[in-house]
Structure formats: C-alpha cells, structure tokens
Image: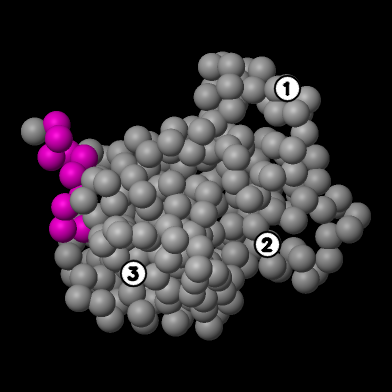
Amino acid sequence: MTNGLFSLAGKTALVTGGGSGIGRAIAEALSDAGAEILLAGRRMDRLEAALGERRGGCFAADVGTGTGIADLAVWALERDTPPDILVNAAGINLRQPASEITPESWDRTLDLNLKTPFFLAQALVPAMQKKGWGRIINIASLQSSRAFENGLAYGASKGGITQLTRAMAEAWSRHGINANALAPGFFPTELTDAVFADTARVEKLAAQTAVGRNGDLADLAGPALFLASPASDYVTGHVLYVDGGFTVK
C-alpha cells in the first residue's frame, strides 16, 4: 500500500530546466519512480545527457518566451501520453543591485520565473482535467519569504510563485489537479556557482541551517516525489521548504 502511494507508473512528467541542477535532479527522481520524463530547456546537448537511457523525450526551446511556451505545449500535448505532471524548474537569477535593474532585466526574470509557470500550466491543464488527475510543482525559494542582497527582481518573482501556487490550487484542485511548490535552500547548481565558489560564504550558510550543512541535489528527490505522487492527494496550495531548517533560525 505504501509503495503504491509513491508510484508514478503510467504517468508522464514534463520538467522545464530539466537539463541540469534542480530540474534534472527532480526529473531523475520521478523517472526512478516509474514516470516517463519529458525534459525541456535551451540546450539540447544537456537535455539528451540528462535523459540518457531513461524513458521519455527532449525538447529544446527558450521557455522564457511566448513562442517557446506555445511550441513546448504543442509538442508535449501531441505525444501519446500528455503530461500528468508539470515541474516548472527553469529559472534565472541575475543578482543585480537594485540600482542596476533595467526594465529588460526585470522582464527577463519575471517572464521566466513567474509568467512561464502559469502559461505553461494553463496550456496543459485541460488535458489533465480530462484525466481527472494532475500535479503542478513550482520552484519557490528562500527568497519567497526572505530578502537577500542583489536579489530584488528574483525575490519578487519567487514571492509571486508562492501566491501563484495558491491561486493555481484554488483554480484547479477541484478537478483533481494539485498545485504545490518546493522552496530549496542553498544547493550547488549553475544558478548558485558564484555562491559556492566562496568557501567562507558556503560555511556561513551551512551554519545557518538547523542540520548544519547545505543541500545536496539528492535531498530533493523525496519531497519532489511526494508532491508528484498519489501520496499528496490531499495536499495542495502548499510551499514545502527543503532548506535543512535555514528558515527556522
């Protein structure tokens, strides 16, 4: 009974940003649980390397644009098994001081981090509704609730993700489509290369957690599988912090 709760056999998961970092780690976890995985991102070589011998497919597109979102949705929906699960893991953090943010960099950040998750979900939800089951997993952040240096635009986008997740849950959960978010702490990814290059800063951040270390990408597997699987049937509109207790100190 317990094993069945976490099985994704017969399910298909579309993961944006699936070629590296958090997106790839989540995609691998869902694949290991039985899901077919569809990986989307800008770099086909990264996507194909991430997919490897796993069951699924890859689609290269800039999902931060309307055209990229539309093309990806068409590709995913035309497959024999349209997505049951959407993981919005593609993201950007330009780390600009407030005085250096331009309308262009603001739009670039908000488009990919906040606009894309909604409009991609909007495109895929009708197919989920026909099945009477679906999962949307957004990626929130420590900056969904805290302010960090040079993070104004990014923080605004991730604060928006928390409310977007709640609003998605209100709109679609009655149709069997649950929407939740993961809020990772500090994990080694391309977006955090600059952070992890600073040994003193890494040690300080680890000390800020309750468990005494920063995250490993493997730490995301269990929480992601929970939110993607039938185990979370009665969980929706929730932001799950996977941060080693960073936000409790």
Q: Which residue is mark 1?
A: 204
What number is the disc on residue 151?
none
Q: Earlier in the sequence, mark 3 or mark 1?
A: 3
The answer to whether residue 208 is visible is: no
Q: CA distance from mark 3 to mark 2?
A: 27 Å
Q: Amino acid at mark 1?
A: Lys
Q: Overall secondary structure of the magenta stretch?
A: loop
Q: Residues within 10 Å of mark 2 (few under 14, many from 20)?
A: many
Q: Quadrant of the N terminus?
A: top left
**Which span of residues is magenta-colored?**
2-11
Rendered residue at 45%/52% (across/down)? 24
Query: In the rendering, which numbered label is found on residue 57?
Result: 3
Query: Depth check: 150 or 133 in front?
Result: 150
Residue shown at 54%/17% (left/top)? Answer: 211
Q: Which residue is mark 2?
A: 109
Q: Residue at x 16, y 52 (%)?
A: 9
53 to 236, vertically: above or below? below
Residue type marked 2: Thr
The residue sitting at the right extreme is 99
Residue 42: say if magenta. no
The three-letter code of the residue at mark 3 reads Gly
Separation of residues labelled 3 and 1 (CA atoms): 40 Å
Crowd class of label 1 (few under 14; some 14 to 19; many from 20; radius 10 Å): few
- In this image, 104 relative to 64: left or right? right
